[in-house]
Amino acid sequence: MSFFEEKNPEMDRYLENHASSEPEILKKLRRETFQKTTQPHMISGYQQGRLLTIVSQMIQPKNVLEIGTFTGYATLCLAEGLSSEGKITTLDVNEDLAYLPRKYFSESKYSEQIDFKIQDAKEFLRNTDVIFDLVFIDADKENYAEYFRLIKPKTKSGSVVMFDNVLWYGKVLDENPKQKSTQVIKELNDLVAKDEDFENLILPLRDGVNFLRRK
């Protein structure tokens, strides 16, 4: 859920009404996500989806990695900017929910460019030789810092990496958080800010997106 969605829904509606329109397949997927999942708030929202699409279209990536597929909304947004020979690898560990992204991936015009894997992301990153142009992480927060360490060698100059939920509903302002996920998100944000190989900015979109570019 976004800050404005919770605190000022009128502003949230204004932002959505002044963003590019959402493709029909994404409208259907968003609707079915709310109908058939127990945690529909985990879906990338309309506004965030448009950001992912615009970034992908600007880069026109050949290799995209997504960690945390959920129902595939962000995957399809990222796919909108793929180069003609581009490919997006999206990883998740929830086999029970996999039927939903598979359904929409097969219906989309990007079906041949999406490689959906039920696989642990750390295992994948330790074994892949692919260098990624664009990476989006929206998965288990307790591994965020480790994901950053493993992803860095898989990037090159100009690669863009985005971590979702880095404001964690404002919990990052707690000086001594007890929750492991909050501790790790704070660690990630500190690691990124101090890493001279990246330039970054935390965008206060929805629950915060840490936007990184490899120098």
Image (tube, rainbow, N blue to C red):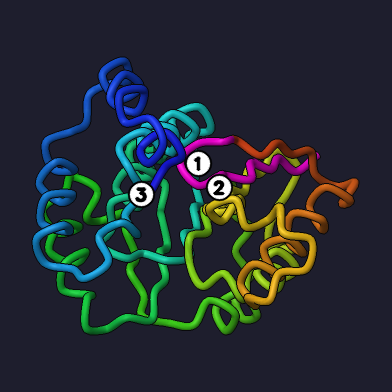
In the image, is residue 98 above or below residue 112?
A: below
In reply to whether residue 193 is colored magenta, the answer given is no
**Amino acid on which disc 1 is placed:** Pro
Question: Of marks 3 and 2, which one's residue comes earlier in the chain?
Answer: 3
**How many C-alpha atoms fall within 10 Å of the one at disc 1: few (<14), some, or many (≥20)?**
many
In the image, is residue 170 above or below residue 77?
A: below
Q: Identify the residue at horizontal 59%, vertical 79% (top origin).
A: 122
Q: Position of residue 117 (x, y in %)?
A: 36, 75
Q: Identify the residue at horizontal 29%, vertical 47% (top origin).
A: 76
Q: Position of residue 112 (x, y in %)?
A: 25, 56
Q: Foreground residue, 15 or 51? A: 15
Between the C-alphas of marks 3 and 2, the distance is: 17 Å
The mark closer to the camera, 3 or 2, is 3
**Amino acid on which disc 2 is placed:** Leu
Residue 134 has which mark? 2
Residue 61 has which mark? 1
Q: Position of residue 174 (x, y in %)?
A: 72, 59
Question: Of marks 1 and 3, which one's residue comes earlier in the chain?
Answer: 3
Q: Identify the residue at horizontal 90%, vertical 46% (top origin).
A: 196
The mark closer to the camera, 1 or 2, is 2
In reply to whether residue 205 is colored magenta, the answer given is yes
Disc 1, SS:
loop
Question: Of marks 1 and 2, which one's residue comes earlier in the chain?
Answer: 1
Determine contact: label 1, label 2, CB under 8 Å: yes
In the image, is residue 165 above or below residue 125?
A: above
Is residue 85 found left or right of 102 in the rendered image? Answer: right
Instruction: Read off the magenta span.
Output: 204-215
Q: Quadrant of residue 23?
A: top left
Q: Foreground residue, 98 or 106? A: 98
Is residue 58 found left or right of 200 in the rendered image? Answer: left
What residue sits right under mark 3 in the picture? 44
Q: Foreground residue, 114 or 166? A: 166
